[in-house]
Amino acid sequence: MEGVILAELGQYFREQARTVCLGAMVTVTEVRMVPDMSYAKTFISIFGHPDRNEVFKNIKKHKDEIRFEMGKRLGKTLRRIPDFSFHIDDSIEYAMEIDKLLKE
């Protein structure tokens, strides 16, 4: 189920790039769900915007709207639409920093 939610959220963020994502490219990197599927911890990467924290705050502000849209898209697939919590995935930046340090 995590894969289905990951794909649908990715599609949603591509469609709503101007409004919810403030013109940034948002990629869903991982979705972790609790066993009863009531909660989904969602990791996202944000690119192409000077203030990534502003984009992140805007996504968190639209959390209920995102859940509603996922309910419309996945209502026939999932019995329960999870409550989402969004977290910034900084693993790419971390890997780039390690690579830079190794090259020095």
Image (tube, helix red, strand yellow):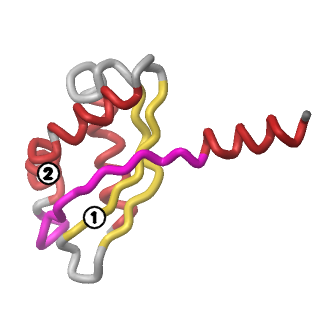
Give the camera-side residue of 1 and 100.
100
- The answer to whether 25 is drawn above or below residue 38 in the figure is above
Residue occupying image coordinates x 80% and y 35%: 100
Position of residue 94 in the picture relative to residue 60 (left or right):
right
Residue 37 on image: x %, y %:
22, 74
Give the camera-side residue of 9 and 103.
103
Residue 8 on image: x %, y %:
29, 49
Residue 71 on image: x %, y %:
11, 55
Give the camera-side residue of 58 and 5.
58
Residue occupying image coordinates x 16% and y 45%: 63
Q: Farthest residue toward the right?
A: 104
Report the disc number at residue 76: none
- The answer to whether 86 is drawn above or below residue 55 in the figure is below
Residue 4 on image: x %, y %:
33, 60
> Which amino acid type corresponds to the residue marked 1 in the rendered image?
Ala
Position of residue 61 in the picture relative to residue 87 (left or right):
left
Q: What element carries label 2?
A: helix
Quarter residue 99 falls in: top right
Quarter residue 58 falls in: top left
> Which amino acid type corresponds to the residue marked 2 in the rendered image?
Arg
Quarter residue 92 falls in: top right
The image shows a total of numbered marks equal to: 2
| Residue located beneath label 1 in the image | 40
Residue occupying image coordinates x 8% and y 49%: 68
Report the disc number at residue 67: 2
Residue occupying image coordinates x 16% and y 38%: 61
Q: What stretch is highlighted in magenta?
A: 76-91
95 in magenta: no
Q: Which of marks 2 and 1 is nearer the N terminus?
A: 1
In what quadrant of the picture does the N terminus appear?
Answer: bottom left
In what quadrant of the picture does the C terminus appear?
Answer: top right
Q: How far apart are marks 2 and 1 (CA)?
A: 11 Å
